[in-house]
Image (spheres, grey):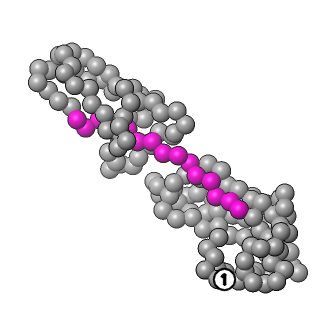
Amino acid sequence: MNTDANGDYSFEDLPVGGYYLVFSNPGYEVSVGGADCDIDVNETTFLTYTLSAGQSITNVDAGYFLFGTVGDYVWVDEDADGLQNDPDGLDGIDVSLDGTDGLGNTVSMSTTTSGGGAYQFDDVPPGAAYVVTFSNNLPDYNYTYFEVGGATN
């Protein structure tokens, strides 16, 4: 059975007896949740139920999520206008991503720009907030202006 667009599912008119539920969703990660979560399953177990006559069990939940990706590139702002309109990227800049995931666990990743100033953090768990920090380990350069002209990237 597949869930509907809201993730809801229902098995109706089942006869009295024993049943087990297995959830699968390729491409997603199983959310394990915290102490107060609504998730009833995890990636290593399934749930067993015995239905009696007239009984309805309507609170069996599974949670899934997708990891995210954070990245872009570091470039030389030749006219110092704060806009990414210059094609020259900077390799060798250290970039770090720090924050907490949805369970409050510390997340800390680092990389170095390459391939024309590109950087990317893969498998970033969903979280409350992340901060991306760029080192200025090239002494001849300064940081350019932030969000000039309404730009937000």
Q: In the rendered structure, does residue 113 fall within the stretch colored magenta?
A: no
Q: Residue at the spot x=55%, y=37% of the render?
A: 27
Q: Residue at the spot x=74%, y=73% of the render?
A: 84
- Give residue 105's position: percent from left, percent from top: 51, 55
Q: Amino acid at mark 1?
A: Val
- Would residue 124 be seen by someone viewing this image from the given angle? yes
In the rendered image, the residue lying farthest to the left is 54
Q: Which residue is mark 1?
A: 148
What are the residue bounds of the magenta stretch?
A: 58-72
- Give residue 92's position: percent from left, percent from top: 84, 64
- Give residue 121's position: percent from left, percent from top: 67, 55
Left or right: where 123 falls relative to 139: left
> Dot 1 lies on which element?
helix
- Quarter containing the C terminus: bottom right
- Quarter containing the N terminus: top left
- Give residue 137's position: percent from left, percent from top: 83, 73
Disc 1 crowd, CA 10 A, few/some/many (<14, 14-19, 20+) = few
User: In the picture shown, does residue 14 fall above or below 60?
Assistant: above
